[in-house]
Amino acid sequence: MSEPICPKCNCEHTYQDGNFWVCPECSHEWNPKDKLHAESSETKDASVKDAHGNGLKTGDAIVVIKDLKVKGSSSVVKGGTKIKNIRIIDSTDGHNIACRIEGVGAMNLKSEFVKKSN
């Protein structure tokens, strides 16, 4: 059985402590048998849509649809850049996709600037 992803921050590096799972990044603890946590991550994923209205979920591949300036840097993520294995996150600033872009590093993106890839 593989380790579950943290329902709060989508961290993949969780570990089991008794009956609970613990996230080392956000210190969130949960019981995987609790339906509230299982449904919350599915609901969160279903609510995020790309620029064309297609639903996005954790693990999808996306394509950037326009050039995006990287805040605090002179680099740019070019339109057409393909990004694999995204994570859907909750954020107050509108950046609801966490990803790693080759040549740039870890970034958060707004779903309105991407489209779902095949």
Image (spheres, rainbow, N blue to C red):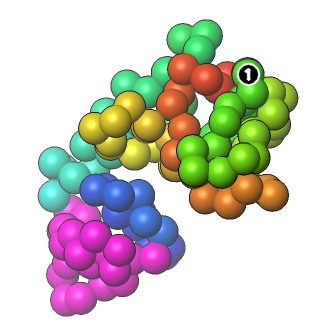
Q: Main secondary structure of the magenta part?
A: loop
Q: Quadrant of the C terminus?
A: top right
Q: With respect to residue 105, does 41 lie above or below?
A: above
Give the amino acid at mark 1. Answer: Ile
Image quadrant in which you'd find residue 44: top left
Q: Residue at x 59, y 15 (%)?
A: 51
Q: Position of residue 90 (x, y in %)?
A: 32, 42
Residue 37 appears in the rendering: yes
**92 or 97: nearer the eye?**
92
Q: Residue at x 43, y 37 (%)?
A: 96
Q: Is residue 101 left or right of residue 28?
A: right
Pointer 1: what residue?
Answer: 65
Q: Secondary structure at mark 1?
A: loop
Residue 58 appears in the rendering: no
> How many neighbours does mark 1 have within 10 angstroms: few (below 14), some (14-19), or many (20 or more)?
some
Image quadrant in which you'd find residue 53: top right
Q: Which residues are magenta?
A: 13-33
Image quadrant in which you'd find residue 46: top left
Q: Residue at x 28, y 56 (%)?
A: 8
Q: Residue furthest top?
A: 52
Q: With respect to residue 98, does 4 lie above or below?
A: below
Q: With respect to residue 94, does 10 lie above or below?
A: below
Q: Is residue 76 magenta?
A: no
Q: Residue at x 48, y 68 (%)?
A: 12
Q: Position of residue 81 (x, y in %)?
A: 81, 37
Q: Position of residue 86 (x, y in %)?
A: 59, 47
